Image (cartoon, rainbow, N blue to C red):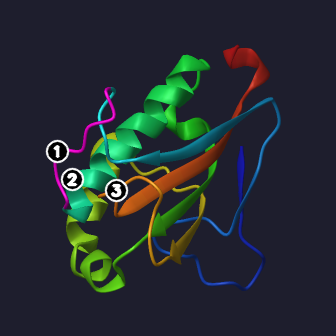
Amino acid sequence: MNVLLPKGWKAPVGYANGIAASGRIVFIAGQVGWDAQQQFHSTEIPEQFEQALKNLLAVLAEAGGRPEHLCRITAFCCDKPAYLAARARLGAIWRAQMGRHYPAMSMIFVSDLLDSPGKIELEATAVIPEEQR
């Protein structure tokens, strides 16, 4: 897997502009901040983000993948001010589960999510290298 940074571009903070990878592609549907029984335990963005990321990594592990195999994550969030206020906590949660791996990412603010009281949803694409399978 190679991080793509065009010559002369300033390096982004907390994400990659692009990733080049080859191997088995894994598509992970949007994961919200509920547990395995589809129960929410918090309405706060940091707690929901942590659970959504754990859920995403559990699906990835089911395919034999690890966090460093994630190439792309799209996040959907219903509360921009709350998200921005929680960025330091979200960064700590990220590093605890992902280390310093930063895939290509997009953050999209939306009016609502299907699963209430969900406030953040993460979907992803991973590529598991041939030698990992």
Look at the image and say whether residue 20 sits in the magenta stretch. Answer: no
> What's the distance in space between the residues labelled 3 and 1, CA to CA?
12 Å
Q: What's drawn in magenta, residue-wise?
A: 37-43
Image side of residue 104 versus residue 15, left or right? right
Name the front one of labels 1 and 2.
1
Quadrant of the rendered structure where residue 89 is?
Answer: bottom left
Q: Residues within 10 Å of mark 2 (few under 14, many from 20)?
A: some
In percent of width and height, residue 120 lies at 39, 61
> What's the distance in space between the residues labelled 2 and 3, CA to CA?
15 Å
Callout 1: helix, strand or loop?
A: loop
Mark sitting earlier along the chain (3/1): 1
Mark sitting earlier along the chain (1/2): 1
What kind of residue is marked 1? His
Name the front one of labels 2 and 3.
3
Q: Which residue is mark 2?
A: 47
Labelled disc at residue 41: 1
Q: Which residue is mark 3?
A: 116
What kind of residue is marked 3? Ser
Callout 3: helix, strand or loop?
A: loop
Residue plotted at (30% across, 43% down):
51
In percent of width and height, residue 30 lies at 54, 48
Q: Classify the position of the N terminus by image quarter.
A: top right
